[in-house]
Every structure is written in C-alpha cells, then in structure tokens.
Image: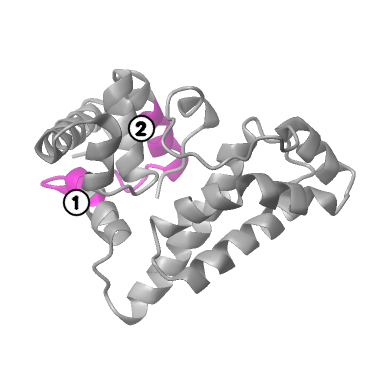
Amino acid sequence: MFELKDSIFIDKTETLGGTTSGTMPDSAIVDLYFARDERAISETQSKYDKYLRTVSGNIIHNSEDVSECVNDTYLGAWNAIPPTRPNVFRIFLAKITRNLSIKKLRAANAEKRGGGEATLTLDELMDCIADGSKIDENLEVEELTKLIEAFLSSKNEADRRIFLCRYWYFDSIKDISERFDYTESKVKMTLKRTRDELREYLVSQGVMV
C-alpha cells in the first residue's frame, strides 16, 4: 500500500484529534529520542496515545491488537530515532501505527477473509486502479507513490482530505459524512470521481495499460 510524504498532510488533513494540552513540544520529544532518554516514550504516549489508537482502531477492531500495534509504534519510533529526525512527528508515528495495523489485518485475513472497513477500503481503491487495466510490472512502489502524491497535490483541499480520510485513515463513509457535513451519497460520489480521475491520471502517465 502507498505511503505519502509528510507535506501532503501539513495543514491539510485535520482528520483526527488526539493531542493533549500542556504536553511537551514535538521537537523536545524528538530530542529525548536522540539523547536515548526513555522519557521519550512516556512523553510520546502521553501526547499521542489516543490519536494512535484511533488510527489503528480504524483498521483493526480488536482492542488487544490495537494496544499491541500502538505499543509497537513506540518501540518502532525508539529504533528509528536516531538517525531519522521526523519532519512531522505526528504523521511519522501514524505511519508506523498504520503499517503495523495493516500487517495485523492482513495476517488475520490470511486465516479468514474479513469484511472489515479497512479491507473494504483497500479493495475499493485497488479495484479502481486495476479495473480494466494493469499497473506496469516494472513500476516501483516508490514511483507509484510519487504519482499519487502529485495527483493529490493537484486536487482541491476538500477532495484531497476526503480521499485521505478514506484511503489513508480508513474512515467509514458515515464518519466522513459527519466530519464534512456531507450526505453519504455526496461522499461516495466524491470518492468515485476522485478514484476515476486517479485512474485516468495513471493512464495518462503511461503506468497503466
């Protein structure tokens, strides 16, 4: 599944809450990681635990699995920082949580095909891309990601945020409808239009045949 650069999210996707007032600034928390000070993990947990549980909970709906993914996120951050210095700490953490949660979902579905929101959403997007065409087998995931980023950057803010809510955060149609004060039909129509435009864009770039 694609990963997007942090700049796609900055000031554009206020999709989830979750920070706690009075907590340490992100830059100071990252400095604790670089100092190998274990307070980095407790400060991260204090500030972002609710946010990360929401990210994971949108993908998997088992509280124990969510807790495992969020706890593993803190370990992942500890192992990655340093040398990595995140541009946007919140998104850096969300990416780790999201990847861990998707792996957990896929492992569960390998045993029994599930009908959860995340599975539906992943299938929805990939079916759109593959419908009637196929991705160039020589295309690298990184190149496809860059093309999706370029496509999203060309969209208006509302369409981009709705797309990210659905296909990055795995929000349900109902949740998106309530967040944007749209009818569910309008959300579905907006997503379909954006998926169709994405497919046309990929064809125009010569990566779908």
Q: Nearer the viewer, residue 170 or 44?
A: 44
Q: Few, some or many C-alpha atoms within 10 Å of disc 2 (few <14, some 14-19, many ≥20)?
A: some
Position in image of residue 182 (x %, y %): 18, 31
For the question of whether residue 135 can be seen, the reply is no
Amino acid type, callout 2: Ile
Horizontal side of residue 99 vs 121, given as left or right: right
Position in image of residue 83 (x %, y %): 78, 42
Residue drawn at x 38%, y 55% is 58
Looking at the image, the residue that sits furthest to the front is 22
Q: Give the total number of marks visible in the rendering.
A: 2
For the question of whether residue 153 can be seen, the reply is yes
Asked if 35 appears above or below 163 in the picture, the reply is below
In the image, which disc is placed on residue 185?
Answer: none
Horizontal side of residue 54 vs 129, given as left or right: right
Say what secondary structure mark 2 lies in. helix
Magenta-drawn segment: 126-149
Residue drawn at x 53%, y 47% is 51
Q: Measure the alpha-carbon separation of dots 2 and 1.
A: 16 Å
In the image, which disc is placed on residue 148?
Answer: 2
Position in image of residue 78 (x %, y %): 75, 53
Horizontal side of residue 79 vs 156, given as left or right: right
In the image, which disc is placed on residue 127?
Answer: 1
Amino acid type, callout 1: Asp
Among the 4 quarters of the image, the one containing residue 140 = top left
Residue drawn at x 29%, y 53% is 122
The answer to whether residue 65 is magenta is no
The answer to whether residue 144 is magenta is yes
Residue drawn at x 40%, y 64% is 60
User: Which quadrant of the rendered structure holds the C terminus?
Assistant: top left
Q: Nearer the viewer, residue 159 or 54?
A: 54
